[in-house]
Amino acid sequence: MVRNQMNEIEIVFRMQIKEYFKDKGTLIFHLCAVVLIGIVAPLFRMNDTVLLSGSILFPLTLLKQWTAISFAGEKEMKTIETLLSSPIKSRSLFYGKCMYCIVCSGVCYLSIFFLMLLVKIFTNEYFQINFWEWVGMLTLFIHILLTVTLIGVDRSITSEDIQTASSKLSLIFYPIYIYIVILFTLFTQHLMVATYLLSAVFLVVLVGFNSYFIFKKVKKMDRSYFCGVI
């Protein structure tokens, strides 16, 4: 049963990837943005707060767009009925869309960060961050991605169009944007105790929410949950 669900999730994920690569204009725009943030910004000697925040905020901005489109876009294109009439289980549809959003955002973040790192090395400069601090930052970012994706795709399900879904997501994203900027400001000011404490508290909250959503709310999703808002 688990294998069947994983296969269904993979099918949905592959469908989303194919749709993404069909839109050449959007793909080129995203690649140009990654190069601009990952290569050009470090060359202008921007401080670490701006660079590290930008490496996370841009993928989160794209994530907001992708999650809003996930199901609300299907409704606007009148393809939601076809999607729901498929034999793929409701939870697999949800997780497949979530996987697409998380993987694309993760690849975007890693591409930007490592481009920044290469530019720093080439110009004989370095981030004020060691390996384990970066691992901690990455762990926190992964949980932020997961939380935003779960909420975002869920809001997309309960929205009639992309604009409505995006408006709902703005209430979630703005506090996270502010939190990330504050976190990196504290870090670059070497206020490490405050940085670690703020990170730990936020991480505990994220883990708790993600656990509840995955083990409680998603299990209750069936076709009626999707059909009720069409």
Image (cartoon, helix red, strand yellow):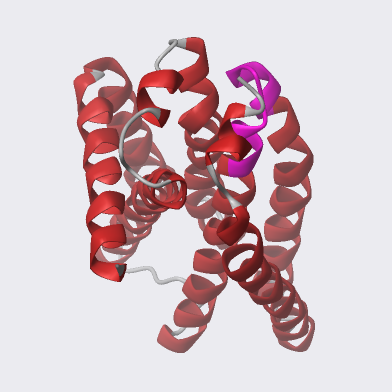
Classified by dominant secondary structure, the portion drawn in magenta counts as helix
- Front residue of this view, candidates 97 and 143: 97
| Vertical side of 223 occupied by 164: above or below | above
What residue is at 43 percent from the left and 20 percent from the top?
A: 81
What residue is at 50 percent from the left and 29 percent from the top?
A: 71
221 left or right of 29?
A: right
160 left or right of 120?
A: right
- Residue 48, percent from left and from top: 55, 61
114 left or right of 78?
A: left
- Residue 113, percent from left and from top: 37, 59
| Residue 169, magenta (yes or no) | no
- Front residue of this view, candidates 177 and 202: 202
What residue is at 79 percent from the left and 82 percent from the top?
A: 194
| Residue 159, magenta (yes or no) | yes
Which residues fall within the magenta stretch? 154-166
187 left or right of 219?
A: right
- Front residue of this view, candidates 13 and 55: 13
